[in-house]
DNA sequence: TCAAGATTTTACCTTTCGGTACAAAAAGGA
DNA sequence: TCCTTTTTGTACCGAAAGGTAAAATCTTGA
C-alpha cells in the first residue's frame, strides 16, 4: 500500500472544525477543498460517500474521543468524584472554554438531524449514562443520578448556545463551575 | 392601498416555522414558495431584501412576542413570583413542550450568527435582564439574580437541544419543572 | 368607470452546489 | 527496473440555488 501523503485521520479533525464553523450545508466542497488543501479528486478518494461520509467520520471521531477521554473514566474510574472533576476539566478543554461549539448539538438543531439521528442520539445517551453511573457510585440514587446527569448535559449545551449567542465565552466557564459544584454536592 | 390578499404579517409566522425546520440556508426559496403558497414575485414584493429580510422579520416578530408576553410581565408585573410562573408556562407553550426548536438558539449555533448577531444577542440579554429584575423584586441579590437567570436560560436552551437530539420532548418538560422550582426557591 | 397602485405570474439570469469521469502522476514492492 | 496501486488534477455535468425583469392581473378609491 502506498504511503499516504495525507492520511484520512489527518483530514478528519480539519473537517470537524469546518463543520463546526459552517454547519453541514454551509460547508461547501469549495471551502472544504480550500481548508484541507485537497482537491475534489482526493476528497472523493478518501470519502467516496461525499459530504455525508465526511460528517459520519467526524461524528465517529468525536464519539471515540469522548468514549476514551470522558465516558470510560466516568464508568470505570476508581474514584467517581475524581472522574467527574476530570470530566469537567476535559469538557472545558474540549470546548475551548466556550469558544468552540458542540458539533453534535449544532447538528441536532439543524435539519440534518434526521440524517445522523442515531449518532446524535447516542452521543447524549452515552454521556448521560456514564455520568449517571459515576453519580450512583458516589452515592446518588439511580433516579437522582439520571436526573442530575440530564440537567448537567442540558446546562452544558445551553451554555454553549448562550456563549456563542452573546459572543461571551465566560458564560460557559461560569456554567461549568456551577455544574461541577452541583455534581459533587 | 389595495387590500392585501396575503398580509405580510400572515406570512411571517409561516416563515418562522420554515426557518425552524430547515435552518436559514436550508430554507430554499422553492420550499418557502411552496409552504407560503406565494411565488417568487410575491415573496420579493413583500421582502425586497430576500431571505435576509425574511429572517429579520421573523426575528423581529419573535422579539416582539417575547417582549409582550414574557419580558414585560417579568419587568413590570406586580407579583414577581407570579410573573416567573407565567414565564415558565408561556415558554413551555411557546416551545410546544419541547417539540419546537428555538430559532434564535439555532441561529446562534449556525454560521448565520454573524449576520444576525445583534438580534440574537439582544434576545438573550433582554430575557436575562427581565428575569433577573423579577428575581431581584422577589428578594434575590442582584448578583444571584443575574447568575440564576443565566443558568435558567442555559437550562432552557440546552433542554431544547437535548430534546431534539434524543427525539424526546419529555426532557424539556422535566427541565422546565426543575427550573421553575429553582427560580421560586 | 377608470386610472393608479398593489400584487402575481412567468420566464430568465448567473452562480454555485455536490458529484463524476478519467487521465496524469506518484509511490512502492518485486 | 517496471508494473501495480494509490493519489491527485482537471474538466465537466445537471440540478438547484438566490435573485431580477417586466408584463399581466387584480383592488380600490375617486
Image: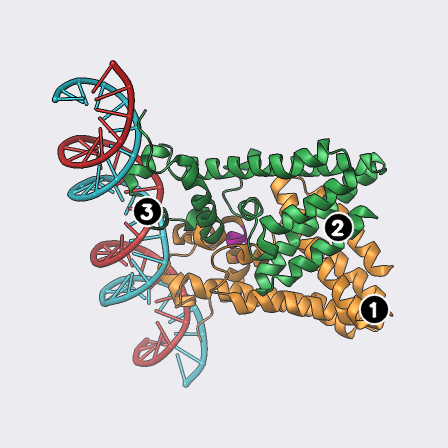
Chain colours: A green, B orange, C red, D cyan
Query: Which residue sits at x=70%, y=56%?
Result: A175
**Residue beneath label 1, please?**
B80
Tag 1, which secondary structure?
Answer: helix
Camera-nearest label, 1 or 3: 3
Which region of the structure is painted magenta? Answer: B16-20
Query: Which residue sits at x=44%, y=49%?
Result: A18
Tag 2, which secondary structure?
Answer: helix
Q: Chain of mark 1?
A: B
Q: Are marks 3 and 2 in contact (CB under 8 Å)?
A: no
Label 3 environment density (alpha carbons within 10 Å; few <14, some 14–19, many ≥20): few
Q: Position of residue A84 (x, y in %)?
A: 74, 43
Q: Quadrant of residue A123?
A: top right
**Residue beneath label 3, please?**
A37
Does the image show residue A110? Answer: yes
Whether labels 1 and 3 belong to a single chain: the reply is no
Measured Cα–Cα span from mark 1 to mark 3: 57 Å
Q: Position of residue C7 (x, y in %)?
A: 41, 65
Q: Which label is found at residue A180?
A: 2
| Image side of residue A77 versus residue A1, left or right | right
Check the image and report above or below for B110 versus A138.
Answer: below
Amino acid at each position: 500500500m502506498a504511503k499516504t501523503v495525507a492520511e484520512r485521520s489527518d483530514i478528519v479533525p480539519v473537517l470537524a472544525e469546518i463543520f463546526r464553523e459552517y454547519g453541514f450545508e454551509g460547508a461547501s466542497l469549495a471551502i472544504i477543498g480550500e481548508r484541507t488543501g485537497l482537491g475534489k479528486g482526493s476528497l472523493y478518494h478518501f470519502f467516496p460517500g461525499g459530504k455525508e461520509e465526511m460528517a459520519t467520520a467526524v461524528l465517529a471521531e468525536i464519539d471515540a474521543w469522548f468514549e476514551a477521554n470522558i465516558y470510560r473514566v466516568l464508568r470505570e474510574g476508581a474514584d467517581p468524584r475524581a472522574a467527574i472533576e476530570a470530566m469537567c476539566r476535559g469538557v472545558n478543554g474540549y470546548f475551548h472554554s466556550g469558544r468552540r461549539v458542540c458539533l453534535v448539538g449544532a447538528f441536532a438543531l439543524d435539519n440534518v438531524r434526521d440524517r445522523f439521528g442515531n449518532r446524535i442520539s447516542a452521543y447524549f445517551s452515552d454521556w448521560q449514562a456514564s455520568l449517571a453511573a459515576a453519580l450512583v457510585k458516589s452515592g446518588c440514587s439511580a433516579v437522582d443520578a439520571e436526573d442530575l446527569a440530564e440537567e448537567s448535559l442540558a446546562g452544558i449545551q445551553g451554555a454553549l448556545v448562550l456563549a456563542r449567542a452573546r459572543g461571551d465565552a465566560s458564560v460557559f466557564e461560569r456554567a461549568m463551575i456551577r455544574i461541577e459544584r452541583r455534581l459533587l454536592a
